[in-house]
Image: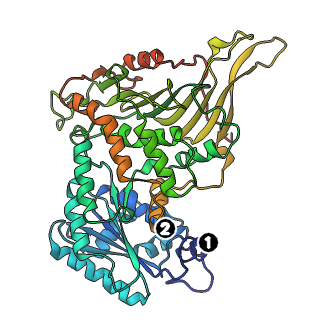
């Protein structure tokens, strides 16, 4: 540790704690030096997500100044201090001293993404740090905070100039961001190009939804609680909704968004990953490959999407953005029903719904159970039992139940059993998804990353639908900003079996 005299700050103590990478139980204690390279270092993703995640890992002691150095690489003409100052405003730390200490770990190298000269310079800078560390092993992690169009050329440069030297033990790992293609063919082409350069165990296809706390809780809930084991099937569950809602539009990103649309941007990756964890069978073990095997199996069990069970929408005003074509048919809202052809889920609709410029902001999984047979309390009209997992905001899990209304009369109402994280875990910091996933990459744990065959199976589900939309065979319906989306989406949900509860609203509990 550099700097300081006498006593140490609380964060400094944490950085000397058992969280250190050198004490990670999965790897030998003498791990050697770690070089983290952020490509696209001057871009928004790096500034807003990647560098803050690295800082939080540093602040909690998972990476330490004696073990790690961070290198930013981009085309911008910047100095080391120039990049540090760009990043500083995005780092929220306990003290300016901690932030400054972290920033001193960062060096900057300028170069293009398709020319060997810049990458030779980058490799030389990394090698100088590794030599000064005098460690037996060299570990190199490359984070591509870049558009997918440059992945092949950048990965070729990394492979040619920047791999971990064969003369030293260690590893080279590469994190790539979504979108992984625009359809099955483009995704397969990208996978083949990267597959020629790296082994599958070296590639980490990041989907930040898999790093969210409540998403990571799904398998624990399902397979560590006897309560759910006999209920989680078509005999008891009527339908499952996986919902993503934003209360703002494209916010100046219309030109970029119009190339992809809400299905490619949200449903085909984020919501489908959640679907896998909700619907998959119990894995043989918690080994990453066993979990990912089961995710692939359930994706391969999904029937082709029925166009009659799809509703597309586009909010009024979307095409006011000058970067959006006047004749754009790109959906900003979609509701898609998936049906799984297997023993557990036959006949149960999975409603995947996402939209922009809606009435609220939330992401949740809503498991709706079947009606109670023989309804002696005549309470069917009040609503069904539902198990709701609120992914964001106000992380929570709650079970909607029918209970007796307090008083002398025998009357029923809907209430809930509620686990709200803000109340139950008041003094616990819930980690950001990116810091968790970067730490998993350092540890070599691929459980929460997308495997190549999983990516292929996901695109096989959605590519026919996406091609129909691109060809104008399916039209996006208009809806007003601030609404629930097209009314046809609610009609679709009702048609496949979802029963909306009227008169009940879940209110996140507060300390007041």
In-image side of 24 versus 147 (left or right): right
Across and down, in percent, residue 351 comes to 45, 28
Across and down, in percent, residue 29 comes to 55, 80
Gap in Å between the C-alphas at discs 1 and 2?
25 Å
Picture quadrant of residue 434: bottom left
Q: What kind of element bears circle 1? A: helix
Question: Which residue is painted at 68% across and 39% down in the image?
Answer: 512
Q: Determine if residue 105 is in view.
A: no
Q: Relative to the observer, which residue lies in front, 125 or 445?
A: 445
Q: Earlier in the sequence, mark 1 or mark 2?
A: 1
Q: Which mark is residue 251?
A: none
Mark nearest the camera among 1 and 2 is: 2
Across and down, in percent, residue 143 comes to 34, 64
Query: Which residue is denoted by mark 1 in the rendering?
Result: 10
Q: Which mark is residue 443?
A: 2
Q: Relative to the observer, which residue lies in front, 434 or 495?
A: 495
């Amino acid at each position: 540790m550099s700097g300081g005299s006498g006593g140490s700050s609380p964060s400094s103590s944490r950085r000397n704690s058992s969280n250190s990478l050198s004490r990670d139980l999965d790897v030998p204690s003498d791990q050697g030096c770690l070089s983290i390279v952020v490509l696209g270092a001057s871009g928004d993703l790096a500034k807003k997500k990647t560098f803050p995640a690295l800082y939080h890992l540093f602040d909690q002691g998972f990476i330490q100044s004696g073990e790690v150095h961070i290198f930013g690489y981009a085309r911008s003409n910047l100095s080391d201090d120039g990049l540090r100052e760009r990043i500083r405003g995005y780092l929220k730390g306990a003290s300016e001293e901690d932030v400054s200490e972290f920033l001193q770990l960062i060096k900057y190298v300028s170069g293009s993404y398709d020319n060997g000269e810049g990458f030779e310079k980058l490799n030389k800078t990394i090698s100088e740090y590794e030599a000064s560390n005098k460690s037996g092993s060299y570990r190199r992690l490359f984070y591509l905070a870049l558009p997918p169009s440059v992945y092949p050329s950048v990965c070729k440069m990394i492979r040619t100039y920047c791999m971990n030297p064969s003369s030293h033990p260690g590893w080279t790992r590469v994190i790539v961001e979504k979108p992984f293609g625009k359809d099955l063919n483009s995704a397969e082409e990208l996978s083949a190009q990267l597959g020629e350069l790296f082994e599958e165990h070296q590639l980490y296809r990041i989907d930040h939804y898999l790093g969210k706390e409540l998403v990571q809780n799904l398998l624990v809930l399902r397979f560590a609680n006897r309560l759910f084991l006999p209920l989680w099937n078509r005999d008891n569950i009527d339908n499952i909704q996986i919902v993503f809602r934003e209360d703002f539009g494209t916010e100046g990103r219309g030109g970029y968004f119009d190339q992809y649309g809400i299905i490619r941007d949200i449903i085909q990756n984020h919501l489908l990953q959640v679907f896998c964890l909700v619907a998959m069978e119990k894995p043989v073990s918690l080994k990453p490959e066993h979990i990912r095997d089961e995710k692939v199996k359930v994706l391969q069990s999904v029937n082709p999407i029925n166009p009659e069970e799809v509703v597309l929408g586009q909010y009024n005003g979307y095409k006011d953005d000058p970067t959006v074509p006047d004749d754009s048919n790109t959906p900003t809202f979609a509701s898609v029903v998936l049906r799984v052809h297997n023993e557990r889920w036959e006949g149960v609709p999975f409603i995947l719904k996402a939209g922009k410029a809606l009435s609220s902001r939330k992401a949740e999984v809503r498991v709706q159970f079947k009606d109670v047979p023989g309804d002696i309390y005549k309470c069917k009209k009040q609503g069904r039992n539902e198990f709701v997992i609120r992914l964001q905001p106000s992380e929570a899990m709650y079970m909607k139940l029918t209970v007796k209304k307090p008083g002398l009369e025998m009357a029923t109402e809907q209430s809930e059993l509620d686990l709200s994280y803000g109340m139950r875990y008041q003094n616990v910091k819930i980690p950001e998804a990116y810091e968790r996933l970067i730490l998993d990459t350092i540890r070599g744990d691929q459980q929460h990353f997308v495997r190549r065959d999983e990516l292929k199976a996901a695109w096989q589900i959605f590519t026919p639908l996406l091609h129909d939309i691109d060809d104008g065979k399916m039209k996006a319906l208009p809806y007003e900003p601030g609404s629930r989306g097209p009314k046809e989406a609610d009609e679709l949900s009702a048609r496949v079996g979802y029963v909306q509860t009227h008169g009940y609203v879940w209110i996140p509990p507060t300390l007041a």
